[in-house]
Image (cartoon, coloured by chain):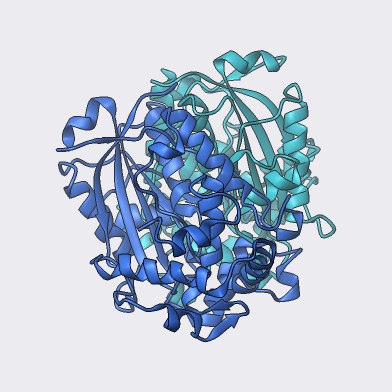
Chain colours: A blue, B cyan
Amino acid sequence: MGSNVYIAGVGMAVVGKHTQVSLRDLAAEVVLKAIESSGNEKPDAIVVGNMLSSLVEQENLAALIADHAGLRGISGIKAEGACGSGGTAFLAGYSLVSSGLFNKVIVVGVEKLLERPTPDTTRGLAYAADADYELIYGISFAGLNALVMRYYMNKHGVTREEMGWWAVMMHENGYSNPFAQLRKKVNLETVIKSPIIADPIRLFDACPLSDGAAAVMLVSEKHKKIADTPVRVAGIGNALDSPDLSSRYELDRFLAAYLSTRRALKMAKREIKDIDVAEIHDAYSIVAAISIEETGFSERGKAPKDWAEGRFR
Amino acid sequence: MGSNVYIAGVGMAVVGKHTQVSLRDLAAEVVLKAIESSGNEKPDAIVVGNMLSSLVEQENLAALIADHAGLRGISGIKAEGACGSGGTAFLAGYSLVSSGLFNKVIVVGVEKLLERPTPDTTRGLAYAADADYELIYGISFAGLNALVMRYYMNKHGVTREEMGWWAVMMHENGYSNPFAQLRKKVNLETVIKSPIIADPIRLFDACPLSDGAAAVMLVSEKHKKIADTPVRVAGIGNALDSPDLSSRYELDRFLAAYLSTRRALKMAKREIKDIDVAEIHDAYSIVAAISIEETGFSERGKAPKDWAEGRFR
């Protein structure tokens, strides 16, 4: 195996609407924060995680952001993996360090989803689905997830109230997070009576559109001393499912979440019961439910009951 | 340093107009060829190099292509670096193997530039430039390169005839290549009298739009036996310049080509005079000239004189 990889510093911008800040500004801000918090040493390479800069007619983000952050001449990659672009970039950055090719690599994720009118962004987000088999019918990501949510609730006998507790709990978490976009608590009634986006998905079942950025500095064993408290990456996992729902083995399963969790745990020599904190992708509450089950925190069909009972607080 | 990395197999599609073949078909074809030519063993991961799938409203290419090639469940990254997306993907694939994270990684580059009307593709290609500082003025990539070509020819006293020999020579190379898009020889008069695209760039100074794909299977030391003739990657280099021309240190220099060549040579413990074969990026003949000079094959301002004299035949 390759060398150990450590997180030496981090940078994060407030998630929200940044109409006065360009993509490059938002990204450079967190890159410079991550560099500053890891001893102010210049990185050797940058990996940029991004899916939708094509909406603002900009590719070549590794060069764009490195240059704007004063890092011209370093090496770089833009990594994309739809909603998992941040994790994909982390995998690329991890391997650039672990391979010994580079000692200090900045991994930065950035999106500007509020730069364009909402219909354009909705259309862009659907690029994560299958253009030939799904988008041709005019379906959006909300529509696709609505199909999955209806199927899941019927199959497992999950109630609207049980699903709704996820949004209540996530808003509680956001309330005390200075980087969160929506910093207000909501009650169950507000969630389950909020406007329908794509039945049964309601407003509070869906994440808001955001502008945001976050960065980490990854370093090799011999450079971990640049950090006050270097954090070793114990394990990492990544897996691909089919983009189109109709090809999935089961409509209410995420093969990629299942496999990637097990790969990361195996590499870290840990089991799911050893994990204290998890950040679950919850673009929609149904995505959170299935992800929690695939990782192994809940039995299949039981995540909403578990969170309604307060198990993940 | 990490482990050695070997090329165990390759696959390539004929470059040209593939209106009846989708992006996923074109990519899967060369992925399967590369797998077949390296002992038919399933890869652990895929890296897809692509810049412009957003034109056909499709991202998430690692999942899309892996699934279509029968590789669901493996790990994957889409890597983008504008016109250098193929090399960027190779860097990501190299480090995934060298780090020991994976033993067999497919790296595939694919573009479908003839799927949309030419004005859309021209606009899309300009995403490699700087949206905020350049595209806002309506300039295309041909326009940007025309600025550089005019500056370069004036500065170094290079004639139209000298520049033109590049296209003559490249068409000779393509004539005997079964994968080439334009398989016909041209003479100097045809080149220098061809229609103007963006003065001084003429038709034969510019590459055609293409659909195409190519793949390599990269493997670790212990898996190199799956290939009949594994080829060790002796060195690799990558570097970022500013995307916008106005921020460059000099208008007729490519910092990225200069630095990446030196990094690859240093890693391989070689000098430029040791190199027998080079594939130079020549989207425009001016790009070839400057790239040849930055790599060190010619003195600055001398590449067109060198190729007009037949030095690179």
Q: Nearer the viewer, residue B112 or A133?
A: A133
Q: Position of residue B203 (x, y in %)?
A: 66, 60
| x and y percentages locating residue A205 in the rendered image | 50, 73
- Rendered view: A78 above or below A152: above
Q: Is residue A104 left or right of residue B135?
A: left
Give me the residue at 41% from left, 59% from top.
B151
Question: Going by the image, does A156 lie left or right of A105?
Answer: right
Q: Residue furthest front?
A: A309
Residue A92 versus residue A33 in the image, above or below: above
Relative to residue B73, is residue A238 drawn left or right?
A: left
Q: Position of residue B119 (x, y in %)?
A: 64, 73
Which of the pair A248/A11 is nearer the observer?
A248
Name the residue nearer the viewer: B217 or B235. B217
| Residue at (54, 35) in percent of width and height | B93
Q: Residue at x 32, y 69 (%)?
A: A172
Where does residue B120 sit, x and y in percent of width and height? 64, 71
Could you tell me which residue is drawn at 60 percent across and 70 percent down? A141
